[in-house]
Amino acid sequence: MELLEKARAMLMGRDLLCTQDWKKEELDLILDLARDMQKERWTGKYFDVLKNRTYFMFFYNPSVRTRQSFECAATELGGHAQFLEPGTMRLKTAKTAGETVEDAAKVMSRYAAGMGIRILEDKVPEYGAGWSLLKEYALHSDIPISSMADDRFHPFQGLADTMGMQKHLGMNLKGKKALLTWGHGALCRSWCSVQEFALMASRYGMDVTIAHPEGYDLDPEVIGWVKDNCKKNGSEFAITHEAEEGYNGAHVVYARNWMSPQAYVNGELQKKAEIEKALKFPKWICCEDYMKRGNNALFTHPMPIDRGQEVTDDVASGKRSIIYDVAENRLHVQKAYMAATMK
């Protein structure tokens, strides 16, 4: 339990809203603990770590893997995860009267030992509103608050991606090339997962290339952080608007659809218009011919995958796909975070 005690001494009570907020040695500690929890999953070593503790899961948006993985994480640590929906609670909104964030946060802090919030693109009036809500909860809570995916960041996905890359490419990722490429499809997905991937890849010394059609730029502040991370690590950063070019020499390919910066108009997500626009780029489907340009490249994706649109089946289910390893890693990094931060 020495590793857990070290993590608790460093991280107890810490919020996790974005990996960029944490020092690299703190991220390393969570990843090391996650690997040990994976190894010791059924030995009983960590079974009572959160005995009689409750973790609130606050879902503005539905989920499959996120709810499953957090509930399993709490159970395997001896605790309990409680599912909450804002629609069943009397919360104040821009259009309705109800309890303020401050009051809700302070009350929930008296009940649970930690809380995660999931709020994505179709539950906010503009980009960044979900992120702002998480920050407000963190401001007023006495328990650690974590993002289970918001409209800007998805820290647990970024950690799971990194854990997967380290398993298959080696612990030292410096000098390896990561391609983050936009994916075609009838979707309108937020920037949270892709931005975390770019942040974590650049924090761990990888050369980062971002590929997308014209008009699909990501958050300029986040891209600025990615550039700074690359500069500090002496690694390369590039952006291309060619569908195939970024694959050249890549060690890992992350292909995912994301919305354009014009997705919100007058406080409303223009989902139909975004989908119609995205379908005009059929060249941006990750396929075996593109993957062959890489350096025996891994394929990864946060899931769910729009097969045949974002990526072809032969890539998603191919020998170099690590999608299921990464999905499993969500459980382990979440267990590590909960064990290290919840009192």
Image (cartoon, rainbow, N blue to C red):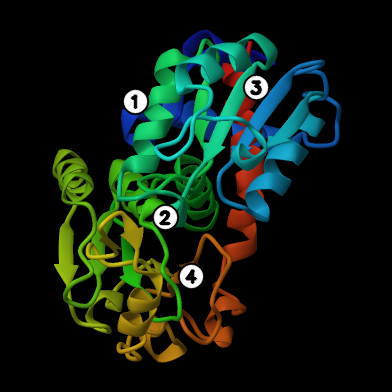
Q: Earlier in the sequence, mark 2 or mark 1?
A: 1
Q: Earlier in the sequence, mark 3 or mark 2?
A: 2
Which SS class for mark 1?
A: loop
Residue 299, label in figure: 4
Question: Would residue 3 be seen by someone viewing this image from the given angle?
Answer: no
Q: CA gap, disc 2 to disc 1?
A: 28 Å
Q: Which residue is mark 2?
A: 121
Q: Earlier in the sequence, mark 4 or mark 2?
A: 2
The image position of residue 131, as x and y in percent, is 37, 38
- Label 4 neighbourhood size at 10 Å, few (<14), some (14-19), many (20+)? many
Which SS class for mark 3?
A: helix
Q: Earlier in the sequence, mark 4 or mark 3?
A: 4
Amino acid carrying label 2: it is: Glu
Q: Which residue is mark 1?
A: 23
The image position of residue 47, as x and y in percent, is 82, 24
Nearest the viewer among 8 and 103 is 103
Q: CA gap, disc 3 to disc 2?
A: 29 Å
| Above/below status of 2 relative to 216 | above
Residue 66, label in figure: none
Q: Which quadrant is the C terminus positioned in?
A: top right
Tell me what residue is drawn at x 16 percent, y 63 percent.
Answer: 238
Q: Which quadrant is the N terminus positioned in?
A: top right
Residue 339, label in figure: 3
Using residue 51 as the reference point, say whether residue 271 is left or right of it: left
- Label 3 neighbourhood size at 10 Å, few (<14), some (14-19), many (20+)? many
Foreground disc of the pair 4, 3: 3
Nearest the viewer among 195 and 299 is 195
Question: Would residue 133 be seen by someone viewing this image from the given angle?
Answer: yes
| Above/below status of 179 relative to 233 | below
